[in-house]
Structure formats: structure tokens, C-alpha cells
Amino acid sequence: MMRSRNTLVFAALLFVAVTAYAQHSSTRSGQVFSGERAFEYAREFAGIGPRSVASQGHAKAEAYLRAHFQHDQLEEDTFMADTPIGPVNLHNFIVRFPGKKPGVIVLASHYETNYPLRHINFVGANDGAATTGLLMAIGDHLRPQVAGGKQLDGYSVWLVFFDGEEAFQSWSQSDSTYGSRHLAAKWDRDGTLKKIKAFILTDMIGDKDLDIQRETNSTSWLVDLVRRSAHKFGYDKHFFQTEEAVEDDHLPFVKRGVPSIDIIDLDYGPNNSYHHTVQDTMDKVSAKSLTIDGDVILETIMLVNQR
Ligand SMILES: [Zn+2]
């Protein structure tokens, strides 16, 4: 993803005192979300190593997702993308947890690593692996609720793992977000987009030092629901203290009128020094941040269902 060039970044001056702290979310099923589990998946996924497009690591990452979701409703969305290095085969993964209510909430992340960094040991622990692990753990949370042909109480929830988020050469509208641009166009053509009640993108939010920006292309009512969810757990200080526009996998959905949010922490390490460097390793990621993310996302799903 990329900061928009012409965007103001401003720090909020208020320090928000946090009173109630870090009680875990429990849904109607009484289960607790486990950031530990998400962290463990992220560790395994980053452990695959670099996962740049068309590499062995990428094939291993695909196999890892395939194996994990083998008993779920898994769809592989394979397509050819025109890139600066020529046509390449990309693979999005979609996992569906059906709900009783007509309509869909999409939770998305990208899973591949930056192609230009393929020659160094860039494992994208926070940039790709952390949110892949987060979505896998959320899947674990939902799975028992659809066991034996049951359905979720609310809308269907679909997990989407995008390929080709990163640029092949340098970031531009045509050299980035290949997987999301492809899927949004496909779902526009076949009518799927009309069913999507909320598109929730997660990116780089495993950061130990969690400060999620309010992304200004995001749909404001959805931002408000995330804010309310964070407040419920006393997580206010981690959310929306600054704001900026970010180009990311949500934009193809935003442009087509789908209510969307990018939950992203683009401030990674001193002067952003861990972003797209070999420093993006698991020691910069924490289970606690992933618990915060999971709690807030599950609560947001509940609020979208009540809306
Ligand atoms: Zn990246």
C-alpha cells in the first residue's frame, strides 16, 4: 500500500485516557478470540520466507492456505495479470462462512510479499503475514458456528486473501493491487458486489506499537462502527488518533460504491524504518495487537449485523 501524496497527516493532540482495559471479546457463542492463535499462524506463515509472486515461497504460501481451509468453502480465484514483468498468474483465496441473513461481510488481507524485495530476506511479518494469521484465527472462531450445515446468525462472512497487492516495479494505479482490482471487477460483473454490506480490509496491524490511522477514503459509518467497537474494549488510544488517505486493496471496492474501510497502521518502526525492509520480522509483531484487532473486528461484524 501507499500513502497518497497530497494528503495531510496530522497528529491528534488529545491523549485519550484509557480506563477499562483489554477484556476479551466473547460472542453469543461464548468463545474468546485468540490473538495468540493469530500470532502463531502469522509466525508459521512468515516462516515460509519471502512469498513474492511466482516464487517457490509463494507456492508454499498457497499450499499453506489450501491445507488450512481444506474443509471450508474455499474458492481459488486464479487469473492472469498484466504486470511490468509480463503476464503472471495470480491466486486470490476466498473462504465463505454462510449466514442466515442475506448479505455478506468481507474481511480481507493480502498474503504475498513485495516483488522488488524478492532477492532479500523480506518475510513481511507485519506486511501480509500478521493479517493473514488474523483472518485465519477469525475463521477458527467462525467455523464451529457453521459446523454440520449450520449458519452464522447474521450476514455471511467471507475471508479474502488477496494476491498481488504490492507493486512489481514501483507503486502506481496500474502497478499495484492486482488481486483486489480483479476481484472487484469480477464481482461487479456477476452481481456479487450488491450483496456486500461491508468490506473490511486489514493491513499491517500486527505492529506491537499499534496506532491505526483513520483512512480517509474509507466509508464514514463503517469507521464509526470500528471506533465504537474499539471504545467498548477500551482500545481507543490505538485507533484513529491521526488520519490520512492510503491507496490499498479497498479502493477498487470504494470506487464501486461498496461500504469499505482500510484498517491500517502505516507507522511501522522509527521513521517507518521496518516498512518494506528486512526488519519486518515477527519480533515487531505482537499477539496483543492481534487480539485488539480480532476483538474489534468481531464486534464490528456484530454492529454491521444490527445496523
Ligand atoms: Zn507492503
Image: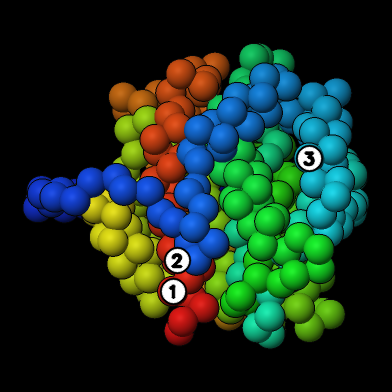
Residue holding disc 2: 300
**Pointers 2 and 3 in contact (CB under 8 A)?**
no
Q: Position of residue 284 (x, y in %)?
A: 43, 23
Label ID, residue 68: 3
Judge whether 171 appears above or below 243 on screen. above
Determine which residue is flagged by label 1: 303
Query: Callout 1: helix, strand or loop?
Result: helix
Q: Position of residue 269 (x, y in %)?
A: 36, 26
Inter-mark Cα distance, 2 to 3: 25 Å
Marks 1,2: beta carbons within 8 A: yes
Specify whether tag 2 is near ligand 1 (CB below 8 Å): no
Count of residue discs = 3
**What residue is shown at x 59% (from left), y 28% (from top)?**
40
Disc nearer the start of the sequence (3/1): 3
Q: Amino acid at mark 2?
A: Thr
- Among numbered discs 2 and 3, the one appearing first in the sequence: 3
Residue 216 placement: quadrant: bottom left
Report whether 288 appears left or right of 72.
Answer: left
Report which quarter residue 50 is drawn in. top right
Q: Is residue 193 left or right of residue 299?
A: right
Q: Is residue 76 placed above or below 193 in the rendered structure?
A: above
Q: Residue 77 location, x and y as percent? A: 86, 56
Separation of marks 1 and 2 at Cα, in angstroms: 5 Å
Say few, some or many: other residues with alpha carbon within 10 Å of mark 3 (under 14 / 14 to 19 / 20 or more): few
Tag 3 near tag 1, CB within 8 Å: no
